[in-house]
Image: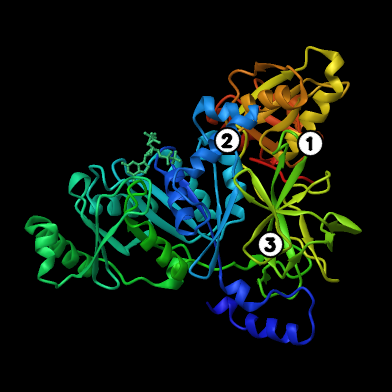
Amino acid sequence: RSRRGGSAAAAAAAAAAGAQWAAPAAEIARRRNFAIISHPDAGKTTLTEKLLLYGGAIQEAGAVRSRADQRKATSDWMELEKQRGISITSTVLSFEYAGAQINLLDTPGHQDFSEDTYRTLAAADNAVMLVDAAKGLEPQTRKLFEVCRLRGLPIFTFCNKLDRPSLSPFELLDQIEGDFGLQMVPVLWPIGDGPNFQGVLDRDTNLVHLFERGDRTGRAKEMGTLELDDPELPIAIGETLYNQLREDVEVLEGLIEPLDMAKVHAGEQSPMFFGSAMVNFGVELFLKRFLTLGQGPAPRSISSGGNAAEQLTPEYPEFTGFCFKLQANLDPRHRDRLAYIRVVSGRFEKGMRVSHSRMKGRTVNLTQAQQLFAQDRESVSEAFPGDVIGLNNPGVFAIGDTIYTGARRVAFPGIPSFSPECFAYIRNPNPSTYKNYNKGLTQLLDEGAVQLLRERSDDGNGSPILAAVGTLQFDVVQYRLKDEYGVETRLEALPGFNTARWSNAGWDAVDAAEADGKLFGIFQAKDRFGRPVLLFRNEWKLQQVMADLPELELVPWAAPP
Ligand code: G4P
């Protein structure tokens, strides 16, 4: 693409000039990363498992689940995941396939965890939208799609579970196009569904891939391929499906624009695939095409240290990266904290010294880095653009921080978060555990899953209030405080309030509105940094206040100062 043009030459020049931290062009070129977005139950775990199988990262299907089971056995916190049957943590899974290095950023599907997912998408270069072909678009898919669109991510669509009775492929195509205004371009086209599912047509090669219904664990046996024009085809798939396929192909040719890489990368066109993760139809075909169509490590805009519109490319001859996620106590036996860093440019090397965007004049030594496979870790000594590394975090890194080498100061823009919609007082009834309570709460807050507000009070010591996107987050915090810090807490709902707005105008403006009697029925709180946050009972009240009091400058969230 044009905006990346010239950077390879720049990198070559930099390398020639002996730039120590420039990433080799070949390492950049072979990296692809993506996140899967889907509604719970669409088959994300199953698809992930099959993809890892092709990558040789696991030996047998079922391993992701059994690993998940193992980790559930080793950590009580994970017990909560098991009880709820949901995935709470997100991890990065890396594997090699056909010479490419693929990083799969795993995101939790439950809606209460969209906060975490949101940040993970900030580290992704591509999104794979997984749709249950029987159900079509579901609420969580829609919400996550909006996030991908905001971030301008290329979106690949995989319609799953074709081995079950499904909506017609045209119906799925129309639904997604209609709802999202995204041009769908089928790359694979299904032949039949449910018990009649016979395989897929690759529209690029005009080859029909026939599949045998294999066992649901291993690689599906491919029965081979037949040309669309092969006289054997009607015999192989049956006259009825053959005639249907012919008709479909004609309609598609008249209807669908050709695939255009630039449009895919701009998030305007979505390559569309059909298959079944469970019986492994179409998964490898998808993976292969993803490698050629997916966007490589993308450039990022930088918010300072250059002009506002400047994009920093992976070829920039210094190491840069940003922190998009923190996690404490990944392994409950070690009280550790990890900061997940997305490498944007250059080369990471174990032991290197980097500057930190928030700490002027201070450097940090990156001694320990880990790559994560679910809960298992492997030490990494090198990483390149598009990779995610986990760094031990003795409280140095916060979400949104940038680290970099070189004299030039670099800072990537902060990562926005969803506005909280659930609020509850948190109480620690046992004063003797105060120290642990404080420590635990601080660390969990650093992870960013919940925010802490305080009720406004004259002495500045108002009751603490947890604020999150969904109430499940509260359960997680309570559970982990007990499990990891030995502190029992009580939660008391703050009923009726479901919207938060930060006032950018500060306390004087809030006080003036209060003195005019205009904040009746609105809850006043302050965030961790002492800034005013107003809680509303409904959208109507919020709209009224926004219209009446523009001077409050209400915004849905505020970045850390
Ligand atoms: P998730 O991570 O998106 O929540 O979905 P997950 O992979 O756990 O899949 C949800 C259910 O859908 C699972 O069934 C899974 O086996 C099934 N599934 C996934 N892909 C396909 C597919 O291509 N075809 C069919 N027919 N089913 C699929 P389950 O009954 O909840 O679990 P299990 O007993 O099968 O493990």
Q: What element carries label 1?
A: loop
Q: Disc 2 marks which residue?
A: 70
Rendering coords of residue 114 (x, y %)? 56, 40
Counting residues from the N terminus, which is met first, the one under dot 3 or under dot 1?
1
Return the residue nearer the eye: 509 or 188.
188
Question: Can residue 516 be seen at all in this image of the molecule?
Answer: no
Rendering coords of residue 448 (x, y %)? 69, 39
- Gap between marks 3 and 1, in whole Å? 25 Å
Rendering coords of residue 506 (x, y %)? 79, 38
Counting residues from the N terminus, which is met first, the one under dot 2 or under dot 3?
2
Q: Is mark 2 on a helix, strand or loop?
A: helix
Counting residues from the N terminus, which is met first, the one under dot 2 or under dot 1?
2
Q: What residue type is labelled 3?
A: Val
- Please determine whether, in this image, residue 205 is positioned above or below residue 404: below
Q: Which amino acid does label 1 sit on?
A: Arg
Q: What residue type is labelled 2?
A: Gln
Please give left or right for residue 275 compared with residue 197 in the image.
Answer: right
Q: Is mark 3 on a helix, strand or loop?
A: strand
The nearer-to-camera label among 2 and 1 is: 2
The nearer-to-camera label among 2 and 3 is: 2
Rendering coords of residue 272 (x, y %)? 35, 59
The nearer-to-camera label among 3 and 1 is: 1
Instruction: Determine the residue positioned at 68% across, 70% down.
Output: 312
- Please determine whether, in this image, residue 251 is positioned above or below residue 120: below
Q: Which residue lies furthest to the front in this view?
A: 59
Instruction: Determine the residue positioned at 65% across, 85% down.
Output: 9
Instruction: Determine the residue positioned at 82% across, 27% down.
Output: 438
- Gap between marks 2 and 1, in whole Å? 20 Å
Q: How is this picture coloured?
A: rainbow
Please give left or right for residue 149 compared with residue 410 in the image.
Answer: left
